[in-house]
Image (cartoon, grey):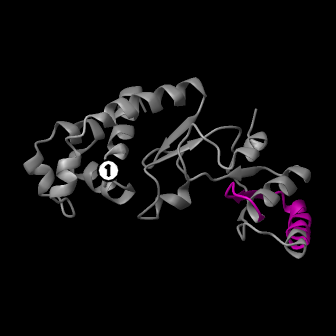
Amino acid sequence: MSDQDLFYLLALLKVEGVGDIMAKKLLTHCGNAETIFKTKMNQIAAIDGVGAVLLKNFKDKSVFEKANLELEFIKSNNIKVSFFQDENYPERLKHCIDSPVLIFSAGNINLKNKKIISIVGTRQITSYGMEFCKKLIEDLSPLDPVIVSGFAYGVDIVAHQLAMDYNLQTIGVLAHVLNQIYPKTHKNMLPR
């Protein structure tokens, strides 16, 4: 994907009210994100689910400034971007209607021919929960799975730490902006 294509996709996702489902509808109708911004608003209004509020939000030109800042951050931090129509986009997500239009990644992620297990749970993990998680990952480690979890306190971060203890690939899924890690204490878990 070109920088220009990515710029317009980032801008589209910055428009208030445009989530992944709406973005896919707009992309299907218009072909690409740049065309969406150049299409007459009465044509956009004809798309199912587009109302007056969303049309008004398309007039907010600050989305381009925000997209430019995010694009600069992506480039300066070697962040990889996968578009939902790209070949490298995770196959299992392609079949989810609400899968992200863009996925950002850093580090060495290899999902080819790998077993994947997601481990999530409470943020206030008990000693029993820690022991259970440790036993689970220990028992799974001979299968060399990829451990996927959030990046929150509790079970999430314990799963990542245990995966690393057993030399397993681990993927932290973040649901926030690219230039911030929450909680900050988990920043030391990021790839170098």
Seen from this angle, which residue lies furthest left? Answer: 42
Front-most of 115 and 69? 69
* Residue to which mark 1 is pinned: 16
Residue drawn at (53%, 28%) of the image: 73
Task: Identify which amino acid the numbered label 1 is placed on.
Answer: Glu
Secondary structure of the residue carrying tag 1 is loop
Query: Residue 157 in the image: x percent, y percent?
Result: 77, 56
Task: Point out the stretch of residues depicted in magenta.
Answer: 131-154
Counting from the top left corner in percent of width and height, residue 129 is at: 85, 73
Which residue is painted at 85% across and 68% down in the image? 133
Up-down: is 51 above or below 127? above
The residue lying at 53 percent from left, 26 percent from top is: 75
- Please identify the quadrant where the N terminus is shown: top left
Identify the image quadrant of residue 108. top right
Image coords of residue 16 (percent x, y): 32, 50
Q: Is residue 97 magenta?
A: no
Q: Is residue 90 above or below residue 31?
A: below
Q: Residue furthest bottom?
A: 128
